[in-house]
Image (cartoon, rainbow, N blue to C red):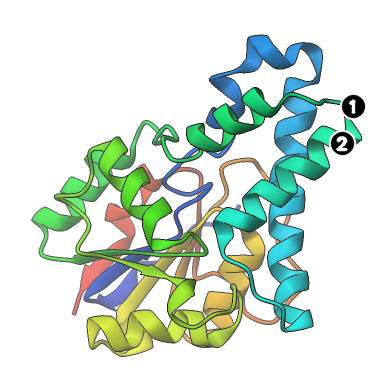
Amino acid sequence: MSANRTIDGITACVFDAYGTLFDVNSAVGKHRHRLGDSADQVSILWRTKQLEYTWLRSLMGRHADFWQVTGDALDFAFDMHGISDPDLHKDLMAAYLDLDCYAEVHETLATLKDRGLRLAILSNGTPAMLDAAVKNAGIEALIEKNFSVEDVGIFKPDFRVYQMAVDGLHARPEEIVFQSSNAWDASGASAFGFKVAWVNRFGQSRERLPGQPDAEIQTLADLPTLLTSA
């Protein structure tokens, strides 16, 4: 990873939710003992199919909200691993409303807010899913607004999703820095016109897509030192 340059002229920080603020693998982690040796594989496949279904439904013009998509993806993962356990399915879905925050999230958000930056979430999640996750993580006092794709009826990386933050925060795209751990989301947001800090938690390779992040960081703790306000 090359050295990052300062990202200038920022008035707002907008965060992806799942994988960026919240650990999507923590849902399975809460019930690991019930899944046994297949726990990690189920978690990976659940997340993979969840994202695939958002892209495919967007291309098909057959939108369903992220709660349904998440349930459908879990159905697929269960089927692939020969699991038939309605109670476990119900409990895993409930756990998705109470995902663990990454360790640095609270302190980083507080630091940014103290500097006068506006903080928001822009996510595929439904309003109810985001409200529950933010409340259960104890960060509701730090987040000004949750932007959900349900307001436009299509998933990321459609540009209509990113436009919601521009309209809702009354800011120009270049005044917003967007954070995501998903390389494809970082590319989409950059192509739209946001400044982007890619939170590369897992040492992924950059996507070969239009739009590249302005900075690559390992955790959100690295973000405050990169930013200068407008």
Quadrant of the rendering where the C terminus is positioned: bottom left
Q: Secondary structure at mark 1?
A: loop
Does 109 sit left or right of 156 as displayed?
left
Q: Residues within 10 Å of mark 1 (few under 14, many from 20)?
A: few
Circles 1 and 2, Cβ within 8 Å, touching? The answer is yes
Does 106 sit left or right of 122 as displayed?
left
From the image, tell me which residue sits under label 2: 79
Residue drawn at x 46%, y 80% as measured from the top left = 162
From the image, tell me which residue sits under label 1: 82
Check the image and name the residue furthest to the front: 86
Where is residue 218 shown, x and y percent of the image?
50, 44
- Position of residue 2 relative to residue 210, above or below, is above
Amino acid type at mark 1: Gly
Of 210 and 36, nearer the camera is 36
Where is residue 27 shown, x and y percent of the image?
55, 30
Does 222 sit left or right of 210 as displayed?
left
